[in-house]
Image (cartoon, rainbow, N blue to C red):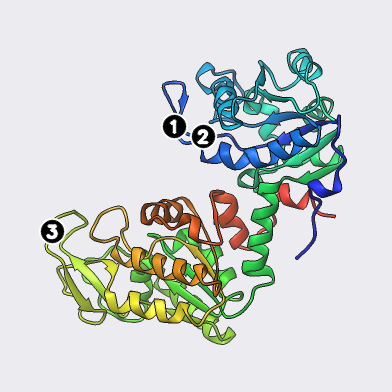
Amino acid sequence: MTSFHTLDDLDVAGKRVLLRADFNVPMKGGKVTDLTRIERGAVTIRELAARGARIVVLSHFGRPDGKRVPEMSLKPIASALSGVLEGKPVAFAEDCVGPAAGKVINALAPGGVALLENLRFHAEEEKNDPAFARALAAEGDLYVNDAFSCAHRAHASTEAIAHLMPAAAGRLMQAELEHLGKALAEPKRPVMAIVGGAKVSTKLDLLGNLVSKVDLLVIGGGMANTFLHAKGISIGKSLAEREMADTARDILEKAEARGTEVVLPVDAVVAEALKPRLATAIVDIKAVPADRMILDVGPATAADLAVRLATCHTLVWNGPVGAFETPPFDTGTIAVARAAAALTDKGKLLSVAGGGDTVAALAAVGVVERFSYVSTAGGAFLEWLEGKTLPGVAALMR
């Protein structure tokens, strides 16, 4: 994997460190309702503070479209960040550039922390405007990007600024890149990828890249229905992109040519509709009733995946294998998640997972901490799996 600069490459003592974080967190009534991203970002802040840096945190919040929207101010996040830092004061600047920012930054002592106002109150941020990047850079001596979740966007605070001053990855960014590198760039084989979700059309790039990277490609969720249909298997009333059958067959042919085994369900849990408390049945995948929908993998499929996992050294997971949000159609995902967690516990499997639905599913099962790494990066995680170059990452490369 291409190497990148980290905090270990920077002498931060007494320096103004511009730290790009992703504090675009859920809020209700002016209060943060989920501290996960702030807690993860605090790791780098604590280290920088301990090393005597003057820490200036940059972040966006929501989509204000270049306008100052009071409801999208980062001010409430300053107090949330202070709480996560065990009461350490966090100064707040009413703007991210200019006199308002400079005044707050200049008042920082070594080890001090300031949070600047929403970057996206300036339209130039999302335009990757060079002049705006220079205005941001003028507020610091060093730049650290700890927002992998924003790295797929070429914005002024993620891409342009990194070329204007010494730049490095923060610990959260570093962990993300290292785990993804171990999972796909330089994996220990065999490698299994589990890809779920509703539509093949939204994950064509992902499937196309993984086919050439992994040894086993497990397809679950609604996507599996499209592949089953493409293979001539009756799927009843199941949701599927039947018009994508040719595309699915192309993917299967490419996988076969590369020696990648595509794994589809061998049995399924079916019901009349995607609703709780309806009568369900477990059927062989070739015996789906015409008036029923496939809504989860069956126990034989879950057991088969557990056996296959035990033969692998690396797992990349994006998307539940069933309609996880509606019990009892979460059973298959729960079984596979527990099997992966158990193998990870024993040191037999490197397990990397990401994507909103996947993180929610693993959290509901209670195995997030038992996986090697669970990414909360969303779109950036997906684009990395698709093999795309992420501008924010490329800017940090040696």
Q: Nearer the viewer, residue 170 or 133?
A: 170
The label on residue 33 is: 1
Q: Position of residue 251 (x, y in %)?
A: 50, 76
Label 3 Cα crowd, 10 Å radius (few <14 / some 14-19 / many 20+): few
At horizontal 61% and vertical 31% (from top left) the residue drawn is 85
Label 1 Cα crowd, 10 Å radius (few <14 / some 14-19 / many 20+): few
Kindly identify the amino acid type of the residue bearing the numbered disc 1.
Thr
Q: Quadrant of the N terminus?
A: bottom right
Residue 156 seen from this side: no
Comparing labels 3 and 2, the label whose residue is closer to the camera: 2
Comparing labels 1 and 2, the label whose residue is closer to the camera: 1
Tell me: 392 left or right of 264: right
The label on residue 202 is: none
SS at circle 2: loop
Identify the residue position indicated by label 2 in the image.
25
SS at circle 3: loop
Q: Nearer the viewer, residue 255 or 250?
A: 255
Mark 1 and 2 residues: CB-CB less than 8 Å, in contact? yes
Q: Position of residue 342 (x, y in %)?
A: 45, 69
Identify the residue position indicated by label 3 in the image.
278
Quarter residue 381 falls in: bottom right
Q: Label 3, label 2: how many angstroms apart (C-alpha)?
A: 36 Å
Residue 44 sits above or below residue 138 on the image = below
Q: Nearer the viewer, residue 344 or 235?
A: 344
Which badge, 1 or 2, is on the more N-terminal residue? 2
Q: Position of residue 389 (x, y in %)?
A: 70, 56
At horizontal 67% and vertical 19% (from top left) the residue drawn is 91
Q: Quadrant of the C terminus?
A: bottom right
Quarter residue 238 falls in: bottom left
Comparing labels 1 and 3, the label whose residue is closer to the camera: 1
